Amino acid sequence: MTASPHAIRHVRVTPIAFRDPPLLNAAGIHEPWALRSIIEIETASGLVGINESYGDQPMLDALAQAAPALRGLSPWALNEMEARVAALVAPPVQTRSEFLAQQVSLAPGTHVSKTVAKVVSAFEVAMLDLQGQLANAPVVDLLGGAARTHVPYSAYLFYKYAEHIERPYAPDPWGEALTPGHLVAQARRMIDLYGFQSIKLKAGALAPEQEAAGILALAQAFPGTPLRIDPNANWSVATSLEIVARLRGVLEYYEDPAPGLEGMAAVARACDVPLATNMVVTDFAEFRRNADMGCPVKIVLSDHHYWGGLRATQRLSTLCSTFGLGLSMHSNSHLGVSLVAMTHLCASVPLLTYACDTHYPWQDDEVVQGGRLRFEQGSLRVPTAPGLGVTLDRQALARLHDNYLRCGIRNRDDLAQMRKYDPAFTGRQPRF
Amino acid sequence: MTASPHAIRHVRVTPIAFRDPPLLNAAGIHEPWALRSIIEIETASGLVGINESYGDQPMLDALAQAAPALRGLSPWALNEMEARVAALVAPPVQTRSEFLAQQVSLAPGTHVSKTVAKVVSAFEVAMLDLQGQLANAPVVDLLGGAARTHVPYSAYLFYKYAEHIERPYAPDPWGEALTPGHLVAQARRMIDLYGFQSIKLKAGALAPEQEAAGILALAQAFPGTPLRIDPNANWSVATSLEIVARLRGVLEYYEDPAPGLEGMAAVARACDVPLATNMVVTDFAEFRRNADMGCPVKIVLSDHHYWGGLRATQRLSTLCSTFGLGLSMHSNSHLGVSLVAMTHLCASVPLLTYACDTHYPWQDDEVVQGGRLRFEQGSLRVPTAPGLGVTLDRQALARLHDNYLRCGIRNRDDLAQMRKYDPAFTGRQPRF
């Protein structure tokens, strides 16, 4: 394959930063800048496949460490790429207790145990983008073709402050959200703008009773709209059960109320709302643990960025259907390349019937040509152009990279950021 | 997609028959002619994708019923094809006891519950052949690229008679095989011809002690060569345990000794040789049953013809690795299109580390241009030409179709054939 005119010649990774609002969560609060990386894989023939992934320093280091593995590979050689990445980026050996300790942290995408899967995913999508250009087919076709023409997303609500404590730029247009009334207004604005038909509330930030009151207010304001709440494992089992009792008949699913698979199992035994997770079933080994326990978690919220890519998530969907589980998708702060990759993936997975999470409405910048992607009635139309169907706006990329250079953030730290507002904040979980 | 110049315009299914030797198995004996079907899917642009599948009457009926579903589809639209086939070819509702009764029958590929998966597989491979032609890439590349350049197969030994009772054509060159000495000679000839480096014995035909003696003779004649025995669930649990005790230290794995998953579990509890199956884990629902029972079966012998295709088998590989199972492949009497599809698939599945089964050495005819595929040291080289990398020899196809028209066989019936030799043969299982 090395003789192919389309052999991979070069990998370029550009860290970027973009404005991110002061969104509250169990771990603390978003910093003023969110980090991502833009991956470009270039062939000897001059084609460029792109992708977007994490932008924290350990991920940039891992991408740099793994990039030489791609040199000379055919864009079709995904299995070989995976083998080479796994050989170059061996995960550190962990004890069981280290592994379990990680499980209750906020963002599974940052776990070191996920490094290989994250790097594989970062390269896989860019190689699929190249494949699509070579085959004159959209990425969704390389994944078996579209099972749907539009992929639905949910309105992802956050409690938030009006502006960042550092005031690094003008306040965002969303204003403060700390009460049920604020939440309803936020949902109204987001639905007016984008047409979402499901609502998710990021919880675990305020007192649980306040957050339950927020959900009840949303249920009243948007009757018939599926609602979800996600306290990010910041509630004890007792609190989880107390709150779900208040929300009887209101929730579509209950995302990560209590810490650990054991905590989730304890909640599942006493509650008839299906439990969803992006914290305790985050890889195939954890999938098996859940299955071995009789599947207390009923809905896996995948994220192709840390599950090993689009094809790995398709395989996850077969595991889910085999074990009678549902599937939807988790999100971090991201731009359009990640969103369009999710859209190709979700279009190709018949099982993916829930509206997916996305932070996209919270970002106001973009790195792709043509600017911000447009939702139609809460959904994105699956692109039909070859590959991902988006290309980089190089001026925007340069500007976002300049943000990265200037912002000073190299690793996301919601806890440290929260201590700027409240020096007594410990981030200890479960807090409630 | 219907406007595409490459939209599917026509599906042609040609039943064929080819000589098959008098091979003994648990159900009886092979008839003089084996049936297959050749599937051709033609696009409006004149491309033709091909495949090979089952040729029995119910399968031909199902293919004919489902073929209109493809009209106008893009060759990339595999998910849509699956949905349309499932809608057109709904499996009959079965009781649990009917389902379990089927599990002990010889050929899971003939189960009515598998019809959708079988038709999907028949079409999927031909559509992948089209995709490869469109993308100028071999099918293995559409499956993630080659994890190996050669796919190893095993020498598949059978007890057999010297010729068919009807004497429909001249005897095959393999002669009679009813003793350990015959078996060793058969293995020697097959290994001399093809270079296989693993040996599988189809058992369940003679007395179990005789068959164990056959394995021991092979172990002595081919030291270090991995050996397997497959009685096709024709042994009781007690017999299975008695025989495996005689074969201590000799078997690579123990395939389907006793009937049913419960029977296999009983064997597994008392035996340290890993159990393999193509009889009790034959679809994703049965995979889950095995997992729920703590995985008494440790190696799944897939067959893309009834597991739903090449991509479904890749997904099965992820289920296997998630649950710590091994994976290899099962075979029926077949020609080169099936063999080359298996080769693309196996090259793309890193987990597939066992040499696969193939009946190919028992056939002497071929339907692809260039004639019989050639093994190199027991392996097939993965094709690098676009698509499957084989095309139909239309004269051979016409001749094999003529065989079909003349042979009179429309459904495989090893039991009825055996009764021609032994009118008292009942086929009741387990016989020993």
Image: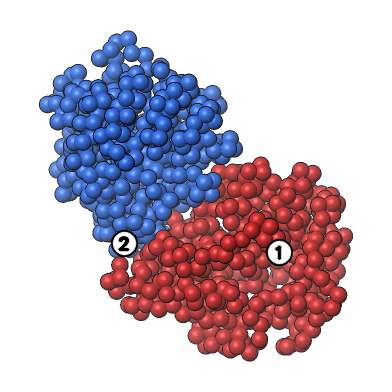
Chain colours: A red, B blue
Residue at the far left in the pictured view = B170
Indicate the chain on which mark 2 is placed: B
Give me the residue at 77% from left, 66% from top.
Answer: A26
Label 2 environment density (alpha carbons within 10 Å; few <14, some 14–19, many ≥20): many
Which image quarter holds the C terminus of chain A? bottom right
Q: Which residue is mark 2?
A: B137
Instruction: Give the structural element (helix, strand or loop) at label 1.
Output: loop
Instruction: Residue B359: give its label.
Output: none
Quarter of the view holding residue B196: top left
Nearest-to-viewer mark from 1 and 2 = 1
Q: Is residue A177 left or right of residue A60?
A: right
Total count of labels: 2
Along the line of sight, the residue nearer the viewer: B216 or A384: B216
- Tell me if residue A429 comes above or below residue B329 in the rendering: below
Along the line of sight, the residue nearer the viewer: B428 or B224: B224
Percent position of residue A412, x then y: 67, 76
Give me the residue at 51% from left, 65% from top.
Answer: A90
Percent position of residue A115, x then y: 55, 66
Q: Which residue is mark 1?
A: A105
Q: Amino acid at mark 2?
A: Ala
Which image quarter holds the N terminus of chain A? bottom left
Percent position of residue A428, x then y: 80, 66
Do the dots labelled 1 and 2 sit on one chain? no
Residue at the far top in the pictured view = B424
Q: Amino acid at mark 1?
A: Ser
Q: Is residue B51 left or right of residue B239?
A: left
